[in-house]
Image (cartoon, rainbow, N blue to C red):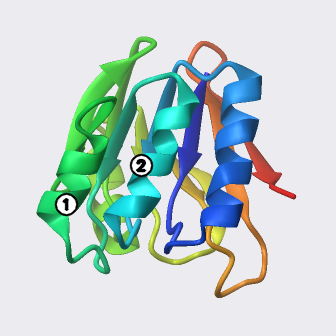
Amino acid sequence: MIGILADSHDNITNLRAAVRLFRDAGCDLVVHAGDFIAPFTARELAALGCPVKAVFGNCDGEKAGLAAALEPFGLIHQAPLVFEHGGRRILVTHLNRPAEEFAAKHTYDVVIFGHTHKPDVRRDGKTLLINPGETGGWVTGRCTVAFYDPAADEVNLVTVS
């Protein structure tokens, strides 16, 4: 099971709640689709007990600090980040416009993105697009994350309380 979040924007309370949810669900990987903001936020993901893969968002200015914070248990890259997990070819980006362009190429099973702060799960041909919404909750007032099961190729969006 892959836990997916984005746009945490330094909201430690919501991020800690999401971490508990992912940990309790037994996620074997967590993906963050950008906009941590500060390294102290990224350090919270150490409590997951599983690897983290992440991309920088448009508001992530302290890139070296974020990379150092994630290094003991994960990695963060400039988008796009491409990897395979559970037999699926996955691409992670932050901005929604490139996500749709990557999906149109039909070379990825899953494209994960953030930026819009709105949950969005849909198919573009064979490609599953996943935006978990915002973990920070600053824009919509809701903290949302997603779970992706690569074996079943299914997504579950969850509001974190």
From this view, report whether residue 147 is shown above or below residue 103: above
Q: Which mark is residue 43?
A: 2
Specify the quadrant of the image occupied by residue 33: bottom left
Q: Report helix, strand or loop for mark 1.
A: helix
Name the spot of residue 100 as percent of width and height, x first: 37, 62
Q: Quadrant of the N terminus?
A: top right
Q: Residue at x 39, y 34 (%)?
A: 52
- Determine whether, in the image, residue 108 is placed left or right of residue 63: right
Q: Left of 103 or right of it: where is 141?
A: right
Q: In the displayed structure, does residue 43 sit left or right of residue 98?
A: right
Crowding near the residue tagged with mark 2, few <14, some 14–19, many ≥20 C-alpha atoms within 10 Å: some
Determine the residue positioned at 30% across, 43% down. 70
Disc sitting over residue 65 in the figure:
1
In x, y percent, where is residue 40?
A: 40, 61
Q: How far apart, in angstroms, are the residues tagged by discs 1 and 2?
A: 10 Å
Residue at the far bottom: name it.
139
